Amino acid sequence: HLSLHDAPPGKAPGAVSSNAPTQMMPPVGLPPATSSPDGVYRQVQQDRGPRSQLPFVITAFALLVALGVGIFLLLQQLPSAPPEPITVSVPDVAGRTLSDAMIEVQKAGFTAIPKNTESSSVPKDMVVGTDPPAFTEKDPGSLVKVLISIGPKASPVPPLVGESEAVAIDLITQNKFIVKTIRRPDPTAPKGQVIDQDPAPGEKYAPDTVVTITVSDGPAIITIPAQLPGRSEGDVGFLLGNEGLLPEFQYEYSDEQPAGLVIRTEPGAGEPLPAGSPITVVISKGPQPVAVPDLTGMTQDQARSALEAVGLQLGVSATTVETGPEQDGKVVTQSITPGNEVKPATIVQVTLGKAPPTTTTSSTTTTTAP
């Protein structure tokens, strides 16, 4: 028997070539004559056994590889999505020294710079915090300011001179300064008015700085010193001025004090006066001058009495002036012109008149006898 699969090309299955050698085939179980061609084919395939699946596996793997390569190339042509940003948390360096804080911020990957800031709670030269604040997420290399305390905020000292004490204290405490008060007399400022301050207005200082105000106690009360009479004008003027009084000098004649010495003060010794008050100081011009009386025609005793009555003294010249009998023994001239003012006890020299002696002429009578 011949196998259907062994027919030469161009021949119908089952045809036998005339040139083919006759072969003996093993007996094959053939289907019954009534079987269809498809049935015959299936029967033949079953007789040949199961086919190998390896070609299909290789083909499927190759297709999968080709598909993966295609997808990869396609993805390469598409725009790539940006990578997720990497951020760093700003470290908390509050309360640390500047050098430690700078190192810590730089170690975290940031650029650190110091910046001064005022703080009433963080001591001077210690770190207040950072800008941006601690735990803020920032890109590596970002700028982080390390805030270093320069102490509390400084405030300007207000102008206080001329204010009342109460107003000045209020202004000082409003700026969180400490008040120190000094009181002293002042000849011009009313009591309770600020006449000086330290520090000067406008200067800036931190809270709790001491601001000293000097408050007027009003004019000082000066007790006029005793024992001023009899002292020189210069001495008394210096003494009273040094006490805070303003001496005003007046001059008058005095029989009690020589010229240039103090007679009295007004008010007198022991009286109170506010500092800066004027005080009258009376200076002696010496005794009051007296007018020389006219002594002409007076006898010596009369002239002495007239001069003593005004405090002058009589001096009689040893020489005389020849006069007529009516001027004999009387004042003919005087050394100081009448009416001139002289100091008391001045000697007025007078010259007396002297009449020449009387000459007696005797007459002789001759009697002739008749």
Image: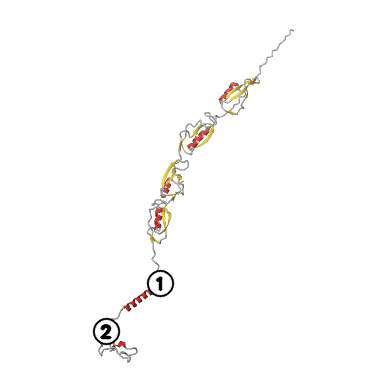
Q: Point out which mark residue 76 bears.
A: 1
- Taking the image as shown, residue 167 lies to the left or right of residue 332, namely left
Tag 2, which secondary structure?
A: helix
Asked if residue 209 is positioned above or below residue 292 in the image, the reply reads below
Nearest the viewer among 73 and 338 is: 73
Q: Which of marks 2 and 1 is in front?
A: 2
What's the colour scheme? secondary structure
Q: Quadrant of residue 368?
A: top right
Q: In which quarter of the image is residue 84?
A: bottom left
Q: Position of residue 183 (x, y in %)?
A: 43, 42
> Badge 2: how crowded within 10 Å, few (<14), some, or many (20+)?
few
Q: Position of residue 209 (x, y in %)?
A: 42, 47
Amino acid under disc 2 = Asp
Asked if residue 211 is positioned above or below residue 4 in the image, the reply reads above
Nearest the viewer among 314 and 362 is: 314
- Taking the image as shown, residue 216 lies to the left or right of residue 49, namely right
Q: Position of residue 206 (x, y in %)?
A: 42, 49
Q: Which residue lies furthest to the top in this view?
A: 369
Tag 1, which secondary structure?
A: helix
- Taking the image as shown, residue 341 lies to the left or right of residue 46, namely right
Q: Whole-Å distance between the Cαs marked 2 and 1?
A: 53 Å
- Picture quarter with the C terminus: top right
Is residue 306 in view? no
Residue on which disc 2 sits: 47
